[in-house]
Amino acid sequence: MKGLVVTEYGEPDVLQWEDVPEPEPAAGELLIRVRAFAINWADLLQRAGRYPGGPEAPFVSGHDLVGEGVGRGPGTDGPPDGTRVFGFLGRNGAAAELATAPAKWFYPVPEGLSDEEAAGLAAPYLTADAAIVDLGRLQAGEAVLVHAAAGGYGSAAVQLARYYGAGTIIATAGSDDKLERVRSWGADVLVNYRTHDFVPAALEATDGRGVDLILESVGGDVLGASFDCIAPLGRLISVGASAGSSSKRFRLHTLFEKGILVGGFTLGLWAQHHPELIEPIGERLMEALESGQLQPAVGGVFTRDQSVEAHRFLGDRRSVGRTVVVM
Ligand SMILES: NC(=O)c1ccc[n+]([C@@H]2O[C@H](COP(=O)([O-])OP(=O)(O)OC[C@H]3O[C@@H](n4cnc5c(N)ncnc54)[C@H](OP(=O)(O)O)[C@@H]3O)[C@@H](O)[C@H]2O)c1
């Protein structure tokens, strides 16, 4: 079979479709014929060799996908063969004709969702759900700030914050066009952070009190400045650093001076160390999808021959929602 191989660390053109061994499903795993896979920011970092603890090149890229079950390892439950399923692998290997994946992290695709919409659902929505509910402990009516709100993770975060009853949702993104889409997902206050400072906007939107829950994935100055607009007893949950750097402005004293909680979440780490914690998140996600209140956004659809272009598209910050490659 063919797989999209990161032949060596580097720019998108190190990606090549090559013959790779067919995977064998172990106990607890499904064998899935891949219909489409998503490209995550993490896939770009792994390709570039900049993902902490990432795989050694060469390796097959990709983390989440939609496909059909075509087999299973011994003693494996889960949806019957032939069911269209979406989910995440908990490791790389989704960008291939066939993939093996833990059955417990694969869910039947709800009726009405296309392959393109389902391919990239798992990682961003499960991550956003964990950040909002498990770590962020959002209470109904609380103000939420979502950074990079037009991206894969950001779009899921805005939609799930609205679904879970947030009050004012403040959202940042890098262009006015992106922000128009973010408004349609339920954000109330939109800030183009290339042209406007989000701190006064967030303070004004909360009558000077600050934001109760900040969903952060950019890092650098965005992370640092976020502490200037967090409410007393607020929570800041970090899931990534798309800008590639941490903040130099973080002061330990801020934690107790404002009584705030700062937390981090990585889906792969929970999957590795406490897989049982993912199951209730998956159940909540299926319920939210079945409510019809989520609108999985697809920013770009590419064929498998355009996989290099798909990596460039996401890396150039052009995607609104998820970037997807259809097999
Ligand atoms: N921890 C987890 O388990 C987990 C799971 C999913 C995602 N994540 C993290 O969440 C983040 C988003 O992932 P994603 O796949 O959904 O990607 P994405 O948000 O679709 O793309 C990244 C976006 O970040 C914004 N950005 C802001 N400053 C940037 C900078 N200096 N350089 C590049 N981009 C910048 C850009 O949007 P603007 O142009 O609008 O600024 C860009 O489009 C990543 O950091 C990823 O690692 C973590």
Image (cartoon, rainbow, N blue to C red):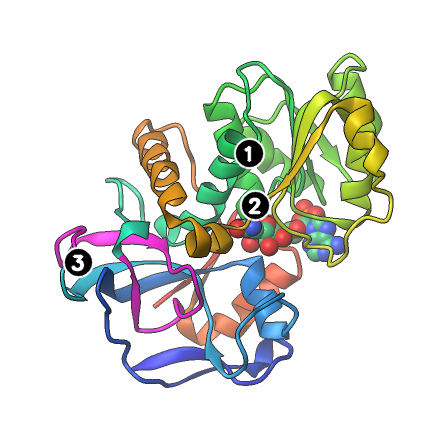
Picture mark count: 3
> Could you tell me which residue is drawn at 35 percent across and 49 percent down?
118
Looking at the rendered structure, the secondary structure element under dot 1 is helix
> Could you tell me which residue is drawn at 72 percent across and 45 percent down?
174
Return the x and y of residue 90 as percentages of the image width and height.
Answer: 42, 59
Labels 3 & 2 near each other (Cβ < 8 A): no
Return the x and y of residue 47 as percentages of the image width and height.
Answer: 58, 73
Q: Is residue 275 above or below residue 19?
A: above
Q: Is mark 2 within 8 Å of ligand 1?
A: yes
Residue that carries the numbered disc 2 in the rendered image: 265
Q: CA distance from mark 2 to mark 1?
A: 8 Å
Q: Is residue 151 magenta?
A: no
Q: Is mark 3 within 8 Å of ligand 1?
A: no
Find the magenta span and give its range.
Answer: 77-102
Point out which mark residue 76 bears.
3
Residue that carries the numbered disc 1 in the rendered image: 135
- 1 or 3: tag closer to the N-terminus: 3
Amino acid type of the residue tagged 2 in the rendering: Phe
Is 47 left or right of 107, judged from the image as shown? right
